Each structure stands twice: as C-alpha cells, then as structure tokens.
Amino acid sequence: MASTTISPKDVSELRARTSAGVMDCKRALEEAGGDMDKAAEILRKKGIAKAEKRAGRTASQGLVVSYIHHNAQVGVLLELNSETDFVARNEAFQQLARDIALHIASADPIGVSAADLPAELVERERRIAEEQAAAEGKPEAVRAKIVDGKVKKFIAERTLLEQPYVRDDTKTVGDLVKETSGKLGEVITVKRFARFQVGAA
C-alpha cells in the first residue's frame, strides 16, 4: 500500500490544534492516512495531545480588517482574534473577517454583545417599552413579560453576534463565528469594531 504524503502545512495545522510535537503529528497523520480529525484523535488517545478545552484558551492573535461599502459612504474596521497566528493566516478565518465587516456595514450593530451596549440606552428602551405597554392598557401581570420581551428583541437587533447574518438570515453572526471556530479547531472572538458613516454624528 502506498504511503500517504504528509505536507508540512498539515503537520503545522495539527500542531496548532493539538500542541503535540512535529514528529508525533507527522506519525499520527501517516497513521490516519492524512485525515486531520482522525490524527488528532490518535494523538489524544496516546495522551500526546492536550485535551481540547477551548473554554480556557485565549484568542490573542488575529487580524484587523477594513471594509469600505460600495457607495463609499460606510466604512468598517474590525478586530477578529484567534489563538494562533497560523489560524489568523488561514483563508477561512480571513473570509470570516471580511464577511463580518460587510455585515457590520450593512446591519449597523452598536456593540459586539449585550455587555457592550450602554446601560442608559438599554434603560431608555425599557422605559419606552413600559410606556407603550401602559398606553396599550395591558394588564399589570403581563406587562413585565412584554417589556422584557421587547428589551431582549432590541438587544438582539443591535448586537453583532445576535443579529441574523445579512447573507443568510437562517443563522446569526455568532453562529457563523462558531462554525468557523469548529472548522479551524480554535477559539475565535470578535474583539471590537468601529463603523464610520458619512454624515453620521
């Protein structure tokens, strides 16, 4: 049986995923016939790979990308982070960064997640929702639920990770990040962004 040729790129990718040594990665890839997932599993079984506990890993590498909308009236700067420089140079990671920047230009989110929204803005939305519920004569018992629902909806509409992705509204931007993170085997986080619009305050 002909042996599978293992490229240095594959070895590097497996190293980034498992933190195992070069020769261990090469042997595991040969044993797995070049299958990346199978090779990672082989290394884990042998106790060579560190268990993939993504929750405790930090994304301190990455990219800053810029995007100018076709009308040259809107521009975006976005910082997208990965754990390793290797993944930051990956085409799938770079494509994700471009897709998110285009989404920000189109959907105008205020923050990355709910934690980024100014408290006074959320409070203002809550007051508006309370006044609307009162004006509509909703019973006291259901008012709080209605107000909470409206505030949650506002947060989802204005935070990047919860917004439906502009090119495929069956998933959120957060889902898109998770998909790429799963594919590349690393934590990926949207660190921050700035959106500029001509004439906007």
Image: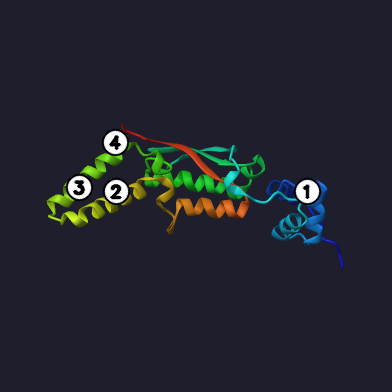
Query: Which numbered dot is residue 130?
Result: 3
Q: Please state which amino acid type lies under the numbered disc 1.
A: Pro
Q: Residue at x 60, y 43 (%)?
A: 57
Q: Quarter holding the N terminus?
A: bottom right
181 to the left or right of 32: left
Q: Are marks 3 and 1 in contact (CB under 8 Å)?
A: no
The residue singled out by tag 2 in the image is: 151
Q: Position of residue 120 (x, y in %)?
A: 29, 36
Amino acid marked by disc 4: Glu
Out of 182 and 73, give the one closest to the viewer.
Answer: 182
Residue occupied by mark 4 = 120
Which numbered disc covers residue 8?
Answer: 1
Relative placement, left or right, of 41 versus 68 is right
Q: Counting other residues with Cα less than 10 Å from the Cα at mark 4, is it few (<14), some (14-19), or many (20 or more)?
A: few
Q: Tell me the CA gap for discs 1 and 4.
A: 53 Å
Is the residue 2 above or below the residue 82 in the image?
A: below
Q: Secondary structure at mark 1?
A: helix
